[in-house]
Structures are given as structure tokens and as C-alpha cells.
Amino acid sequence: MSAQEYHVDREGENRVTFRSRASIEEFEGVTDRVDGYVLLDGERLTPETGGDDTGFYLEVDLASLDTGIGLRDRHMRDNYLEVRDHPYASYEGRIVATEVVGDGRFAVSSRGKLSIHGVTREVEVPCEVEARGEGYRARCDFQVLLSDHDIEIPSVMFLKLANEIRLEVEFTVLPATPER
Amino acid sequence: MTRFLIPATVLILLLPPGVGAQERTARWQRSGAPTEVPVTVFHSTQSANLPTAETLGRGEWLFEISHRFLPAVSDGAGALWGLDGPVYNRLALSYAVADNAMLGITRSNLQDNLDLSAKVRVLASRAGGIPVMAALNAGVAWNTETPAVFGIEDNERQAYAQLIVDALLGERLALGVTPTLLNNPRIADIDAETAFALGLSGQLYLSDQASLLAEWLVSEDRPDLGHDAGTFGIELETGGHFFKLILTNSARMNPTQFLGGTPFEFSAGEWRLGFNVTRVLKF
């Protein structure tokens, strides 16, 4: 059984969304700039997939996040995420277990290091994965605490950013080829 | 033997971070650089009175309410340092038709001045590491409640055109120069003239939220408007608001009025309190 490497399809409909639900204001930020790879221990995803022979690395280009309001984007880039020092958020780890939940559909649990704002935390992230052609479509949904990543929320005025941020990451991977 | 261990330790320390932490067998490589962070000089689209080269993002609205308290701070507690009023009031609404262009309508109760303006940012670059921005700003205004002077009813329209050049020094100090042409600075004159004025603005960003601002307007000495206008104050910003609290020797706010100069000297006895509040909105 040979290992297979998959790469994020940059032309796929990738989408990273974060949602902040503070008491006064609710908003979300969106980008399609997610990239990275997934290593499987076999050709395809199976109920046996998981363990040290698997691996993945995903990164999000943070300066591309768009909340719909330019001023808020600037505050997010400059004050909270400090993207000039930390341009990417990344998640690197291994597949823990794979469960078949339907025809070509899987529930994949992952564990790894989530790095945001230069602060790395060990996390577990569940993903729904669907076989699509040669590749897969994945959707991962999880929460992060800004305080876990040393992101300070101004406490003096008008708290409009929640500490608990919901992240949704959707992306497509295709088998790696010499040119991809 | 210890001698040989030292170089090995040094070698490990010199390895780039990540090496050894996890063996990456993937052939994947990052394609291209991260998204470039847009240039910022002044955070707000205007200083206290002068415009900056900053514009809104496309589709965004900006609502403004500003006051200048007419009695001087030096009038003391009896006039609540000016807060008793009367006040000049200004309401404004702007809309960004593109990421670099915005239109505005502004009304001040001083002579019921109604102003229509357009601003286009023509440059935003980080030339030689210094963020620089430039914009063109122009407007026309009508004074619909004019003083009772013979001939003035026919001379209620004013106009202006400005070049705005801003630069950010040391990541914290924004400086702006605004050469201005002002048509019909004094509506009491029967004939309209075109005059030159020069706006200078500076803002020192102390933290993510607080900054100090200062403005100076060099204008021609003319009857009733014999002095340059100076302004200084603080600005607080949140995700969508800017609050400016200022002291100034000019109570005139709409562009054609402010740019003509002020009747008050720039001295502590003539300083007046004022504020601007703006809110960015998107529907």
C-alpha cells in the first residue's frame, strides 16, 4: 500500500470563515486563500486511515481576510492578528481516525498544532470529508479562543470582538502531481 | 570528548525552526508571497477639518456629526467653557463608489451651507518603505441663509479643489499637506475671487485606539477672516467609529467656510471646544 500526497486545489472553491459573536455586533471574515497538503498512509481514505503515517499542513493567508468593512479589516490586520509579523495561521498534524458515514463520506478526526498570531496550541479538529473525483472535499468546523493565542481584545471601549471565534475551513484537495 | 559535543549542540541551535520537529515528506511548496497589506497613512478619511487621502472601501457609508461650541473656553464656568452654546452643527454623509473614490454631502447650520464633494485617491504606495498616499478632493457649496448684505444673494455659491499628499513616518506619525484653491472665500463680497490656502495636518498614533492630532490652515488675511486656523486634539477609534475631541480657534466647519480662515486669533483666550463623531456603515 503506497502513500499518497494530496495538495489543496487553489482553483477549488476554498473558503475560510471566522465568526465573532459579541454582545453588540456580530460579524464574519472570509478568504479563499488556504493552501497546504494532506498525506495519507494509502492511496485513498479508508476506515483504517490514521496514525503516524498520515500528516497534513494547512495555512491561511491572513492579510486576505475580508470582513466587509475596510476599517475593521485594518484593525484586524494591524491590532489583533498583526499580520506583518505573523502572515499565516497554520494547522499541522495527523489524522487520528477515519469513520465512514455514508457513500464516499467520512468523518475524520485530526490532532495537531494550531498556530495563530505566533502562538501554537495543541488542538483536535473534526472534519467532514467527501470523495470528489480524484480528490476530496473537506469541511472542518471548530472554535478557538483569542486569549489562547495572545490576541488582546481592547477592554476600554466598545467590546465588539468575541473571545470565542468560530472557524469554518472548507477546501478541496487533489492528488499531487509533479506540476501540482 | 566534551569538546566534540559543543559544536554539535551549536549546529542544532543553528538549524532553522521546524527542522527536526516534524519530518515533512510532502513535496508541497508554498506558491507565492502572502497578500500584501494595504497602505495606511491617516486612519480616518479626515483630520479635524482637513481631508486626508484615505477613502472608504467600496460600498461603505460614513455618517458624521460634528459640533463647534461658539463661546470660547475662556468664557469659563458661567458658559460651561463653551458647552452652553450656541453651537455650529455639521451633518455629513459619504459613500464610496469605488475603493478609491467617495462622494459626500455635508450641511452646516452656519449660513445653511450645503456642500457636495468628491474625493479620488490617486496614489497609495510604500515607496522606499514610507507609506505615501495622494488624493484629489473637490467640492461646491451653496449658502442658502446669507447675511443681509446688498448683492450677497447672487454670490452664495462657493467651490474648492485640493491636492492631498500624506506620508507616514516611523509607523506612527502621519503628516499631510493640502494645497487648496478656494473660489469665493467671502460671500459678502459682490465679486467672487479665487484664493490659495494651504492645509497642514499631523497625527501621532499612540496606540491601537488613541492618537493626537493637529492642523494648521494658512489662509489669506481678509475682512472678518483675518487669521489662520489652528486645531489640536485627540482621536479615539473603534472598529467603526472615530471620536475627535478638539480645541480650535475656528468654529467654521464646512470646507468652503473653514478654508477661508477664521475671525479669531490663535491664542488660548480664543480656543473653542469641538468634536467630530463618524461612523462607518455598510448595508
Image (cartoon, helix red, strand yellow):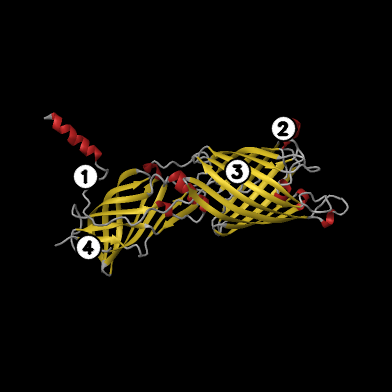
Q: Is residue A161 visible?
A: no
Q: Secondary structure at mark 2?
A: loop
Q: How many marks?
A: 4
Residue A153 in view of the camera: yes
Q: Which residue is mark 1?
A: B20
Sequence-wise, which precedes: disc 3 or disc 2? 3
Q: x, y (%) of residue B236?
A: 57, 41
Three-letter residue code for mark 3: Phe
Q: Which of the pair A76/A121 is nearer the observer?
A: A76
Task: Work out whether mark 3 precedes mark 1 in sequence or the reverse, and give the earlier one.
Answer: 1
- Name the residue furthest left: B1
**What residue sits right under mark 2 in the picture?**
B267
Chain at numbered mark 2? B
The span from disc 3 to disc 1 (Cα, nearest Å) is: 51 Å
The answer to whether the residues at label 4 and label 2 have Cβ atoms under 8 Å apart is no
B268 or A31, which lies in front?
B268
| Mark 4: secondary structure | loop
- Above or below, A174 against B214 in this view is below
Residue A42, position as x, y percentages in the image: 18, 61
Q: Circle 4 sits on which residue?
A: A45
* Element under disc 1: loop
Give the percent coordinates (x, y) of residue A129. 29, 62
Real-space Cα distance between discs 1 and 4? Answer: 27 Å
Are both tags, 4 and 3, on one chain? no
Q: Is residue A119 left or right of residue B9?
A: right
For disc 3, the marked residue is B243
